Amino acid sequence: MRTTRLLTLAGPAGVGKTRLALELAGLEQRGGRCEVGLVELGSARTGEEVRRRITAALAGAGEGRVPIAGARSAADADRERLLVLDNCEHVLDDCGLALGALLPRHPGLRVLATSRESLRLPGETVYSVSGLGVPDAQGGGSLTGMLGSDAVRLFVERARAASREFELTEENAPHVAALCAGLDGLPLALELAAGLVRAFPPAAVHDRLDDRLSLLTCGWRTADPRHQSLRSAIEWSYDLLTPAQRSLLRSLSLLPGGFGPDAAAALAVGKDIPASAVPELLAALEAKSLITPCTDRGSSARFRMLESIRCYGQERLRAENEEEAAYDRLAHWLTELARPLREAALTPAETRRRLAEERDNLTCLLEWLSAGGDPRRLLLTSALAVVDIHRGRPTGKARALLADALDRTDPGADDRSIALGEAARLAAEEGDHDEAIRLADEAVTLERRRSHPNDPLLCRVLLTRGTARTRRGDQGARTDLRECLEISDRVGDPVTTAFSLVLLAWQSLPAGDVATAARLIDEALPVLRAEAGPAPLRMTLVTVGALALERDDPATAEAYFAEALSGMDHPGGASLALWGLAVAAVRGGRFERGLRLCATAETQGAFDASALPPWFRARVEEAADTALRALPRAQAEGALVAGRELQPRQTVEYALRGRLGVPARPEGIVDGTGGATAGDVPLTPRERDVIALVTTGLTNRQIAARLHLSVRTVETHVRNIRTTLGLRSRTHVAAWAARQAV
C-alpha cells in the first residue's frame, strides 16, 4: 500500500475485504502516517451521491473544504491522506470519474478501495483477497496441525463466542476441517456456520452444506443487509451481471472440478452465446470475482468456482428450468472427450490427461445420470475408471458406478465391451482376480461377435484379461498376450506390444526362466519409459523389481519397486511394489523395515497377501518368516504395530525413504546424540501430538487434558515413543524432537 496511490482489494463476497481494509487503515492511522477517511458506498446509488460522500470524507465532518474539482489550496493538495472506499463494485464508473479528478490534483492522497471487481484505472494496483487457509485434507487430522489453519482458528474462535462449551476435540476435528474446506475458507461463511454450534454440532452443520444457502442466514443484526446471509452476499454480485454472464455462470455451476474455455463453450452452446464470446465472458466473470483462475496451469487456462457461488448458480439454474439441458450438453462434451477409449488398446496420454482434469466433473455427471439407462454412461464410467486406475487410487465408487451402468443399459450398447473391460481392470486392481477374469471373458466374447471387429478395442479387452490372468498366476494369459502382440504389430502400436512383452516376462518368472524375462524386459522397458501411462509403467517397474529379486539383487529390486511408488500419495495402486519392497528389505537384512512394510501393505494396499500371484506370495511369506525369526518377539510385534498404524501418505513416505537417499537405520543403532532419525521411525499422528506437547514441558496429566485423553493413554503413548525411538527419558524425547522438528 505504501508503493502505490491506488490499491484495490478485490475478491468474492464474504472474503473479508472490508475487514482487511479497515485493519490496514487503522495501522496507518495509529502509526501517525496520515489522516484516514472512510467512505461506505454500499448504499450509494448515484454518481452525485458517490461524489458527495467522497468530498465529505476528505473535508472532514462534511465541511466541504476539498472539492473534487475546482480551486484548492496548497495545504489541501500536500496533506497526506488515505481514503478508504468500501464496496465499489456497483458504482465503478462513478468512482472512476471521482478518482480520475482527485488523484492528479492531490499528490498527498492515497486510495484504498474494496470491490468485487477492479476499478480499471491508470496506476491501480489490484490485490486479490482469497479465503483463509484450510487444513490439509490428508494431513492426518492432528489437533496441532488443525490449529495451524487460519480457517479453523477463526471457526473455533467464533464458535466459542457463540457457545463457551465448544472445544475442538479429536472427535469433531475432522468435521471442522471438512466444514472449513467446504466453505472455501470464506470468513463470512465460517462465521455464519460457527454461530450454529449452539444448536448443531459441526458434523451436523457439515452434513447440511449442500443446502448452505438456506442454512447460513443468521448474520449480525448490525451487518449490512448483503452480509446478513450467504445467499444475499452472493446475490448482490449476481444481480450486477449482464444476462449473458448470468447464463454462463449458471451453466458453469455444474462443474465442481473446474473448467477450461472448451468446457465453457460446450455448455454455452444452445444458449444464444457464440463460442467466440466465451473468452470475454470468462474474463468478465473472473474480473467480478465469481470464478477464480487456477494458477498452476502453465500455458493453458482453467478456472474454478468457489463452492458457495457454485451452489447459488445451481439454485438459479434450477429456477430457470435449465438444469436438464445443461447436463445433456455436459454429457455430450465429456463423451466426445472419452471417444479415444474406443480407438486404442492403451489410453493415449493426452486423453488420460484431459480426463484426469475432468474427473470431478465426470463423477458429478454420472451421479446425475445414475437413475436412468442413458447409454453414454458406459463410456463415461469407463473414463472415470481409467483415471482412477492410472492415478493409482481405484475407488469402490467407480466400480459401483460401472456395475450399475452395466445393469441399467442395453446389453447390445456399443460401449458395453469397454465398460466390461474397465470393470475387470478395477476388480483386478482390488485383488478380485476371479471376477476380473469373468468380466474380461464377457468383454472378449462380446467384441468377437461384432460383424466388424474393432482391432484396437479387441486388443484392449484381451490385454485386460491377460493382465488379470497374469496377476492370478494363470498360464493361460500367454494365449491372450500373444494375440495382443499380433494385433498391436498389425496396427502399429509399439506401446501395447511392449506392455504385452512385459506381461510375458512376468509369466516367465514362476518357472525360473530369468533369461527370457530379462530379454523381454530389455526390449520393452525403453519404449514404456518413453511413452507408457502410469498404470502400465508401474506394472513394468514391478516386473523389473521382481526379476531383480529372482536374481538375488535386493538393492536393484528396491530401486525399481520404489520408482513404481514414486509420485503417489496413496499406495493402493502399487500394492505389488509395496510387497516387493518388504521382500527386498528382509533380503537386505533390514528386518524391522520389512515387517513394517508387510503390515502397512496389508492395511493400506488394495489387497492383502492372499490375492498375490502364488509364486510371489511365496516370496513374501518366506521374507516375513525370516524377519520374525530374526527379531526378538517384542521388537517384531512393535514393527508390525507401527506398520499397521501408518496412514497412506506416511506409508508412501516410509516406503520411499531408501530411494530418497536416506539409508534406513540398521536395527538397534541410534543416531549420535541418542535417538533414531525421524524419517526411519514412523510415528502416528497422535504420537506426534504427544511429542509436541512433551517438548513444551507439560506433564502427562496436562497433556491428557489438552488432548482429551486419559492419563493412562498418554503414559502408554510416551512409553511407546521412547521404545520406538530407543530413548530413555522424556528429556531425551524432547531433545530428539527439537533436532528432528517433529
Image (tube, rainbow, N blue to C red):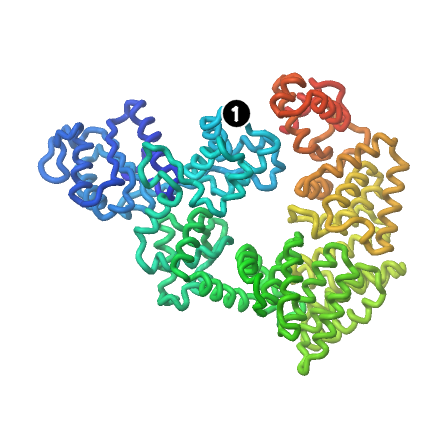
Question: In screen coordinates, is 134 left or right of 81?
Answer: right
Q: Position of residue 73 (x, y in %)?
A: 11, 31
Question: In screen coordinates, is 160 left or right of 272?
Answer: right
Q: Residue at x 78, y 56 (%)?
A: 543
Q: Residue at x 45, y 33 (%)?
A: 195
Q: Residue at x 44, y 57 (%)?
A: 252
Q: Position of residue 21 (x, y in %)?
A: 33, 34
Instruction: State the residue in front, 235 or 386.
Output: 235
Q: Position of residue 586 (x, y in %)?
A: 84, 42
Quarter occupied by the C terminus: top right
Quadrant position of residue 537 = bottom right
Q: Is residue 237 placed above or below 193 in the rendered structure?
A: below
Q: Is residue 189 placed above or below 516 in the rendered structure?
A: above
Q: Residue at x 41, y 57 (%)?
A: 317
Amino acid marked by disc 1: Glu
Instruction: State the residue in front, 385 or 651.
Output: 385
Q: Which residue is mark 1?
A: 165
